[in-house]
Image (cartoon, helix red, strand yellow):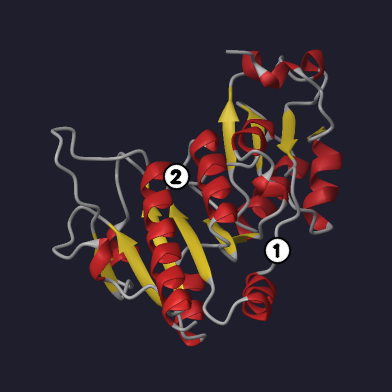
Amino acid sequence: MENTEKKDTGYHLYGMHPVLEAVLSGRQIEKVLLKQGLEGQQFRQLLTELDNRDIPFQFVPVERLARFRGGKNQGVVAYLPQIDYMPLEEMVDRAFQKDSAPIFVLLDGVSDVRNLGAVARSAECAGAGGIILPAKGGAAINADGVKASAGALLRIGVSKCKNLRIPIYYLKERGFQIVAATEKADGLIYEVDMKKPTAFVMGSEGKGISDSVLALCDVMARIPMRGDIGSLNVSVAASLMLFEAVRQRTIRANTNL
């Protein structure tokens, strides 16, 4: 696989001072790589600001940072998003302007950018109002994700929140039902009324939906399967959930003709 870190695409910011200034100015940052062993007052200030603003950061060996700008980066590299994240409230308001019963997808711990891109593609095709991601623990939107989405990530609204509990509470206040897609459920996705405002929560393939998020969901539903593997790729599962909602709404629309 081609190593995209070797390319200076314009979606990275380099150096202690430029990254700190970007953080202080409120610029959107996906994550920051820091060289192991960094010290000094400015480094401590940067670390504090990253922590206070819930910007993911990671300490890495100098060999990894050497891939960026030939190592001329002062041991600090920030990933900049390739899209403009939308405030949650604005994204929901826009969705209601287009649809009286919007659909959203919340991704809990989905870290693979290609899965994120595939989910976004399905969500856009299904007419969803947007995708909601946690600030930490989720996939960063990069060139691979945009490519996997076939450009959908440039068309659909995407919001990042400190954690998924915040948007779940907000969506409930706005009249949404929160539906968890999980094999732990007794009921099937076909038994859920998806004609009302609905937010689907999808978990990672390895860990699924976290217990703290699952406890806040109104409905749990599973996708029936007859094979031996017992689980689907998260992007496939999201597609099945989304297009079950499309099916139900299409039947209702045709019935009301």
In what element is the residue under mark 2?
loop
In percent of the image, x 66 and y 38: which residue is there?
A: 146
In percent of the image, x 46 and y 64: which residue is there?
A: 164
Depth check, front residue: 231 or 78: 231
Report x, y in % for residue 235: 43, 43
> Is 208 left, or right, of 160 in this rendering?
left
In percent of the image, x 53 and y 43: which residue is there?
A: 116
Q: Amino acid at mark 2?
A: Val
Q: Quadrant of the N terminus?
A: top right
Report x, y in % for residue 217: 32, 71
Q: Which residue is mark 2?
A: 110
> Is 100 left, or right, of 86 in this rendering?
left
- Check disc 2: other Cα within 10 Å, few if <14, some if 14-19, many if 20+: many
Q: Quadrant of residue 65?
A: top right
- Check disc 1: other Cα within 10 Å, few if <14, some if 14-19, many if 20+: some
Q: Amino acid at mark 1?
A: Met
In what element is the residue under mark 1?
loop
Depth check, front residue: 13 or 185: 185
> Is 184 left, or right, of 25 in this rendering?
left
> Is 17 left, or right, of 158 in this rendering?
right
Report x, y in % for residue 92: 62, 75
Report x, y in % for residue 241: 38, 57
Q: Which residue is mark 1?
A: 86
